Image (spheres, rainbow, N blue to C red):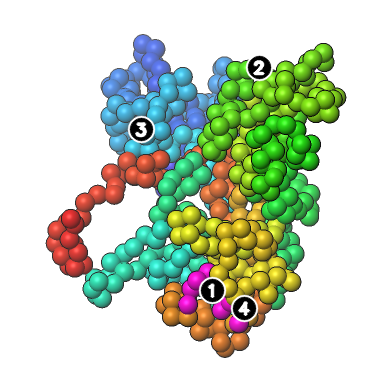
Amino acid sequence: MLRTHTCGELTKKDEGKEVVLAGWAHNIRKFGKKAFVDLRDRYGITQLVLDEKLKDIYDSLTKESVLIVSGKVEKRKDINPEMQTGEIEIMANTLVVASKAERLPFEIFNPSVESTEETRLKYRYLDLRRGEMQRMLEFRFRAEMIIRNYFQMKEFVEVETPQLSKPTPEGARDFLIPSRVIKKNFWALPQSPQQYKQLLMVAGIDKYFQIVRCFRDEDLRKDRQYEFTQIDVEMSFVDENDVMALAEGMTSVLYSQLLGIKLDKPFPKITWHDALDKYGSDKPDLRFELSFVDVTTDFEDSGLRIFEAAVKGGGVVKAIFLRELLTRSEIKKLEDVAKTHGFPGVAWVKYDGDELSGSIASKLTDNLKQKFSKKKGTTLIMAGEWLPTVLALGGIRLALGDKFNLKKGLSVLWVTEFPLFEWSETLKSATPMHHPFTSPLKGFEAHLGEKISKEDTLNIPSRAYDIVINGVEIGGGSIRITDHELQEKMLKTLGINKTVAQEKFGMLLDAFKYGVPPHGGIAFGFDRLLQVMLQTDSIRDVIAFPKNKSGRAPMEDAPSKADKEALKELGLRCK
């Protein structure tokens, strides 16, 4: 080893020792015939004292140069309580500049000088020198070790599945890789190991898990990347409660060992319908209440045409009540939120303790005036078809949570009984809300077999479940269909005939002919889980080398054009 100790290791107990340290020049202070250098490595910072015999070296020393220093440990006269090694310093005998650093492209450690995320990503190897970034990488590694230990204790087997596979519909676009050997054919990078892990259940590996890399060619956002890490789990001879209990155990162990937070188990459950009906989201943030009040019956004969039309058309009228008296400008911002959901605005009524005011106050019936005059505050009201209305009001609810700083504490829950199908306006047909192997809720099997209408897509509940932390879906799974006839009915409902089914899912359907155990599982978005635990703004903060928001890798300047000869070898050419 080129060093005897790290820069965070030495204390006053080491006084008098001859040591060798190595690291980066974090800070340099020159005072005539003496210089002080803060030497940094992953473990901490130690102050070096350089006297006149080393002047030729420290005169030309630059920040972030790599140094190797030998010297004696001495007590500091002025103790620095902010430093782990603040009681000692190293009187340097020799100093070697192992690598001189050029002028830095941005200020790594000066919080008063802001740098753009694009610059940080371009020079990610410099950005990762920051203590908070290195602590994130250590946190991630510790989380992986805890997860593996947890599943080992539960007698699971980690099995690696292929990274080159067949393109299959998983809800996003595949990344395709042309085959050099079999021309005009393509591999796909896996969006998830879904079919493989179910095949492992057929194989008798009744407890499988994997910390696995997945790939989806979809539009990026703060909590989404092209390539991401998944904690993938599948179990045989289980029901929903078994999978949930296992997932709760893993989540609780992570929070306990990494953050010192004890989670109460079992986690509360809410159905998909109730989550949307009360909070306007299938991943509700329950760190604050602000649940919806159903006022549909109050407005069916209100004389207000928009509301009456919504009720007569089978829609709903929903409201949020606030104790605060919102100003007109504050309501305008909430109307902007409604517009992003396709609504022209939001109706409102305000009662200040003396009189009613608001966009519909003058048109209210006496009964409604009496209803809205019971409490001092502001009521926000929306009307229309159930799903668009609750989603729009849910967006307003979250905006209010931000405005009034209500998102405090920790909320962990399960959302259950998701619909088996959702409607695709692009395809003009039903598509699986999760995937076509998700089992319907018991008692609803008979509803499968024929194509389903838009009106009925949300009426068949499934045995699917999501785990939600602080309004973020960090994991989801289901009990799978293992009955051959039921699987055929499911595919028929989706308009997938036997030929297409065999082409897309042949290996799984064939395997199910030879004895398949009942099974189910769950997959956690590992990066997203870390983002929530560390309370960072972006998933990019918890990935060592992420893509930027435009989907590029600025550090390596990728993606880039391919060499013509390489394309020719693959039988491809670019238009």
Question: Disc 1, disc 4: CB below 8 Å?
Answer: no
The crowd level at tag 1 (other Cα within 10 Å; few <14, some 14-19, many 20+) is many
Residue 249 visible (yes or no): yes
CA gap between label 1 and label 4 equals 9 Å
Question: Disc 3, disc 1: CB below 8 Å?
Answer: no
Residue 195 place in picture, x, y as percent: 51, 72
Q: Nearer the viewer, residue 200 or 157?
A: 200
Residue 569 place in picture, x, y as percent: 17, 67
Q: Which residue is label 3 attached to?
A: 119
Which numbered dot is residue 431? none
**Mark 3 or 1, nearer chain start:** 3
State which quadrant residue 568 falls in: bottom left
* Range drawn in magenta: 485-497
Q: Amino acid type of disc 2?
A: Thr
CA gap between label 3 and label 1 equals 48 Å
CA gap between label 2 and label 3 equals 40 Å
State yes or no: residue 345 in magenta.
Answer: no
Residue 543 place in picture, x, y as percent: 47, 46
Q: Which residue is label 4 attached to?
A: 486
